[in-house]
Image (cartoon, rainbow, N blue to C red):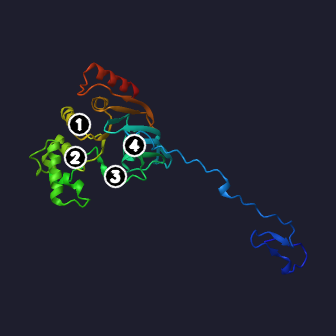
Amino acid sequence: MCAPRPKEKIDDRELTQNPRGRICVRGSRFPAKSPVSVISTHSLPAAAPPPNVCDGDAGIAITLAGISKSFDSAEGEPLTALENINLAVRAQSIFAILGPSGCGKSTLLNIISGILRPDRGQVCFGGVPANDFDKWGSISYMFQEDRLLPWRTALANVEFSLEAGTMPRAERQLRARDGFKLVGLDGFEEAFPHQLSGGMRSRVALARSLVTRPEILLMDEPFSRLDAQTRSQMHHELLRIHALKHMTLVFVTHDVEEAVVLADEVVMLAPRPGRVREIVPITSPRPRDSTQPEVVQYIQRLRALI
């Protein structure tokens, strides 16, 4: 509204407004203002599009750009778990995430899997942003615990990974049996989890992760609960399967020797907030033994970073 002249009766006809610019032209204490000029956007140069961090080498399976993640602490204060993580995982490689307890290793794996969303940054799969990625079925996750269903047989536990889709039961069972053969568990299809050793349960969990035929396999310390001998056997099995299937494998571990024996590259995370301290390529030929001089050097180098 226009401000009226004080102590004067104002005729309604004296107050008018420009119906388009809403500018007072009579009866106002303030002078009329000229209409605001409108600049056509057609005359402005187009803004440069933001850089696409997913554009890059076609041989990169996973890209992490500027990933940060925080949680609320018990006191209600933000607790930064990861800060500005930048990584590139080559397709069909084995990539280890190593670091001390509490540095955000599992959080990073959960962000890659889509279980968690980062507060900042972007995840890309084969050059496709995670928000546009539509092949989540090509990513499989093997947890630290085997998470076998005790009321199901070993075969039914493996088959469980396929039940969410529309695959016929006969095909599911055939795929599950092929998974058993792949991990060397022929003859134990009808056993229940309580009838299996720790190593056999880990093989069942591995078969369940592989039965979907993933292109990317994520593993969160899957062998940490096994004894040293069984863990070494599982390392050999994993390398054998990787050589057959040519998948991209990303795993979390606290074990420096495990990282060096298995991985093509190892990223060492610094303590909280988790940050990339160093990325170490492991170029020693396979099979590797933790007593080999070159392997020992890698182990010592990584231990010095923790």
Q: Choose the circle earlier in sequence order: 4 or 2.
A: 4
Task: Identify the residue under disc 3.
Answer: 136
Number of the label disc, if any, that sits on residue 108:
4
Q: How crowded is mark 2: few (under 14 residues within 10 Å), some or many (20 or more)?
A: many
Q: Which amino acid does label 2 sit on?
A: Ala
Q: Which amino acid does label 4 sit on?
A: Leu
Q: Residues within 10 Å of mark 3 (few under 14, many from 20)?
A: some
Query: In the image shown, does 58 or 292 lie closer to the viewer?
Result: 58
As helix, strand or loop, the secondary structure at mark 4 comes to helix
Q: Is residue 266 left or right of residue 78?
A: left
Q: Choose the circle earlier in sequence order: 1 or 3.
A: 3
Inspect this view and state whether residue 3 appears: no
Task: Identify the residue under disc 1.
Answer: 243
Q: Which amino acid does label 1 sit on?
A: Ala
As helix, strand or loop, the secondary structure at mark 3 comes to helix
Q: How crowded is mark 1: few (under 14 residues within 10 Å), some or many (20 or more)?
A: few
At x 61% / y 51%, what residue is drawn?
46
Q: Quadrant of residue 290?
A: top left
Q: Position of residue 193 (x, y in %)?
A: 16, 49
As helix, strand or loop, the secondary structure at mark 2 comes to helix
Q: In this figure, what is the number of numbered marks?
A: 4
Q: Choose the circle earlier in sequence order: 2 or 3.
A: 3
Alpha carbons under labels 2 and 3: distance apart: 19 Å
Alpha carbons under labels 4 and 2: distance apart: 21 Å
Task: Identify the residue under disc 2.
Answer: 205
Q: Position of residue 24 (x, y in %)?
A: 82, 70
At x 65% / y 56%, what residue is drawn?
42
Inspect this view and state whether residue 194 appears: yes
